[in-house]
Image: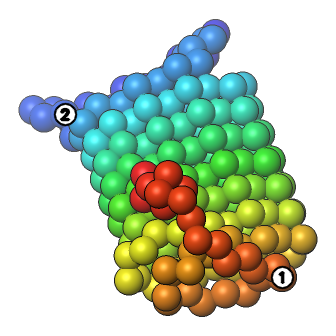
Amino acid sequence: MKGKLVTVALFAVVGLTVAAVGLAKSFEGTPGDDVIIGTPGADVIHSKAGNDTIDSEGGDDRIHAGDGNDRVIAGGGDDRVRAGEGQDSVHGGPGNDHLRSQQGTDSLNGGEGNDVMWPGSGADQQDGGEGNDRLHALADDNQQDRLDCGPGRDVAILSVREQDVALNCEVVRVINPTPQQAADDDK
């Protein structure tokens, strides 16, 4: 059994660094700035608030990065990542990933695999990477979104109300989203 680390500064806790211990599969961060490293297996990670760094290592992971300017590396596997409010950077890695962010200027990168991306409101950047990806831009937020589908048979789904989008995609569908679809894009 390998164990590793909790980082604490003398006189004050500046954040938490958590790495896999034995068979642990669930990790929870603090309201501060955390570094959380998962296992090669399937993990459930909740980072709470703060400017966090999460590396899930591999496996089919479920990651919820709370509010703050977070960096998430999902690694290999079919991962589901939800980033909170803030300026987040989310990398899916190899696998069929579902990447979702909330308010803020976010960067979503699916990596290899057939990925689905739902950014929230803000001037977001999406890069599908290799694979047959589905990228969404449904928020009516008057912010410029940039979508680069990458290699593969990809689809970008845009709202008729989304007025400022830069695209590099093979197929573009423009829809009039239902209130639920528009609300989902802002979560």
In the picture shown, does residue 130 fall above or below 58? Answer: below
In the image, residue 36 sits, relative to residue 95, either above or below, namely above
At which x and y percent is residue 120? 45, 62
Q: Amino acid at mark 2?
A: Val
Q: Residue at x 19, y 34 (%)?
A: 13
The label on residue 70 is none
Q: Quick one: which residue is furthest to the right in this view?
A: 153
Neighbour class for label 1 at 10 Å: few (<14), some, many (≥20)? some
- Give the x, y percent position of residue 184: 49, 52
* Residue denoted by label 2: 13
Which residue occupies the foreground of this view, 144 or 93? 144
Q: Amino acid at mark 1?
A: Glu
Lateral position of residue 28 relative to residue 77, left or right: left
The answer to whether residue 86 of the structure is visible from this angle is: yes
Determine the image quadrant of residue 159.
bottom right
Under circle 1, the secondary element is loop
Circle 1 is placed at which residue position?
170
Q: In this rendering, which labeled residue sits more in front, label 2 or label 1?
A: 1
| Residue at image coords 40%, 26% | 28
In the image, is 186 to the left or to the right of 86? right
Q: Horizontal and vertical percent for residue 61?
A: 65, 33
Query: Mark 2 falls on what kind of element?
Result: loop
Q: Quadrant of residue 41?
A: top right
Which one is in front, 93 or 6? 93
Check the picture and name the quadrant holding the N terminus: top right
At a point 36% along the width and 31% down the height, the residue shown is 29
In three-dimensional space, the C-alpha distance between marks 2 and 1, rounded to whole angstroms, equals 49 Å
